[in-house]
């Protein structure tokens, strides 16, 4: 688990280290202990499990007092012990991961906690290359939905697919031959006509893209009346300022790219 992510983080650390860290070189035979401090309040901590794995790669002992998903305030979250040189070269990467993941988890939690109803809040594929799985894991820690983890997890037909296949019917028929019973077909639509055309062609999920909240609710009501088993997702132009306008009994998923693209880093520090 996390093998790819650990490899990537180690590559970044070694590139940062270059031949050696000049400031830390004389400390290479010294053992030390240090504390990891959270310097903000009202934070959903995320990244602990991955950091423990990363530290073990450098033979650094770690003990954390909290688990991923815990809601905590300004405090010491854990302690580490090991070779001083190794601790110093992993410090910034370790803190960056905790800061990023905790920021996403905290934002997700703050938004999800305001939803009164069955509608779920989901991330999108607007994640940073290489660290996307960690960003989506942070969404889970914050109580959100990850959406699809990769391109093959579900069959998602977007506007460019429809343009290239020539029509909604052509696109759906083309991908059906590759659909396993474990997969769902989702299609992105931009108007009511295409919405019902997609439903008539037996897709599993319909994404209403760039609809106003009122239009999305009205169309979702019509769609659910005729096709009660279809999952309805809304996306496009949705932010923390307007997402609650889309919460509705007929809307299953609100997906928001800004869960992972517009965040305020959580402040962590390491003190020997």
Image (cartoon, rainbow, N blue to C red):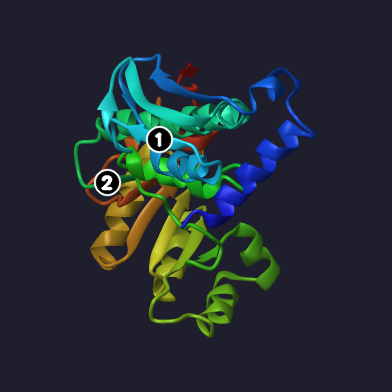
* Front residue (pair 105, 54): 54
Residue drawn at x 43%, y 37% as measured from the top left: 61
Residue 150 vertical position relative to residue 129 in the rendered view, above or below: below
Instruction: Give percent across and percent down for residue 42.
Output: 30, 19
Mark 2, secondary structure of its residue: loop
Q: Quadrant of residue 126?
A: top right
* Front residue (pair 184, 133): 133
* Front residue (pair 11, 81): 81
Residue 99 vertical position relative to residue 151 in the rendered view, above or below: above
* Front residue (pair 28, 63): 28
Res. 201 in view: yes
Left or right: 247 with respect to 80? left
Lower position in the chain sequence, tag 2 or tag 1:
1
Q: Residues within 10 Å of mark 2 (few under 14, many from 20)?
A: many
Could you say which disc has been placed on residue 119 in the image? 2
Q: Circle 1 sits on which residue?
A: 62
Residue drawn at x 46%, y 58% as measured from the top left: 1
Res. 129 in view: no
Instruction: Give percent across and percent down for residue 230.
Output: 32, 65
Left or right: 30 with respect to 1? right
Q: Residue furthest front?
A: 29
Residue drawn at x 34%, y 41% as measured from the top left: 141
Mark 1, secondary structure of its residue: strand
Q: Residue furthest left?
A: 117
Q: Quadrant of residue 255?
A: top left
Q: Residues within 10 Å of mark 1 (few under 14, many from 20)?
A: some
Could you say which disc has been placed on residue 37 in the image? none
Q: CA–CA distance between discs 2 and 1?
A: 38 Å
Residue 259 vertical position relative to residue 25 in the rendered view, above or below: below
Instruction: Give percent across and percent down for residue 143.
Output: 30, 41
Left or right: 63 with respect to 125? left
């Amino acid at each position: 688990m996390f093998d790819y992510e650990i490899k990537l983080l180690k590559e970044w650390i070694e590139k940062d280290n270059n031949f050696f860290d000049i400031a830390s070189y004389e400390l290479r035979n010294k053992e030390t202990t240090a504390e990891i401090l959270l310097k903000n309040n009202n934070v959903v901590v995320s990244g602990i499990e991955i950091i423990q794995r990363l530290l073990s790669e450098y033979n650094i002992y770690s003990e954390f007092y909290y688990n991923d998903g815990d809601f905590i305030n300004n405090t010491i979250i854990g302690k580490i012990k090991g070779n001083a040189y190794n601790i110093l070269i992993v410090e910034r990467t370790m803190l960056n991961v905790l800061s990023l993941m905790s920021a996403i988890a905290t934002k997700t939690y703050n938004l999800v906690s305001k939803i009164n109803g069955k509608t779920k809040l989901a991330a999108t594929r607007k994640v940073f290359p290489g660290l996307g799985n960690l960003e989506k894991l942070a969404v889970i820690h914050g109580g959100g939905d990850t959406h699809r983890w990769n391109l093959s997890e579900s069959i998602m037909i977007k506007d460019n697919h429809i343009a290239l296949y020539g029509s909604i019917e052509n696109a759906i028929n083309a991908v059906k031959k590759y659909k396993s019973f474990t997969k769902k077909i989702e299609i992105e639509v931009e108007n009511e006509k295409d919405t019902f055309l997609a439903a008539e062609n037996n897709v599993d999920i319909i994404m209403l893209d760039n609809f106003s909240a009122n239009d999305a609710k009205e169309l979702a009501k019509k769609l659910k009346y005729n096709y009660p088993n279809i999952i309805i997702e809304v996306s496009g132009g949705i932010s923390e300022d307007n997402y609650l306008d889309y919460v509705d009994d007929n809307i299953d998923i609100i997906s928001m790219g800004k869960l992972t693209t517009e965040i305020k880093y959580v402040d962590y520090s390491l003190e020997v």
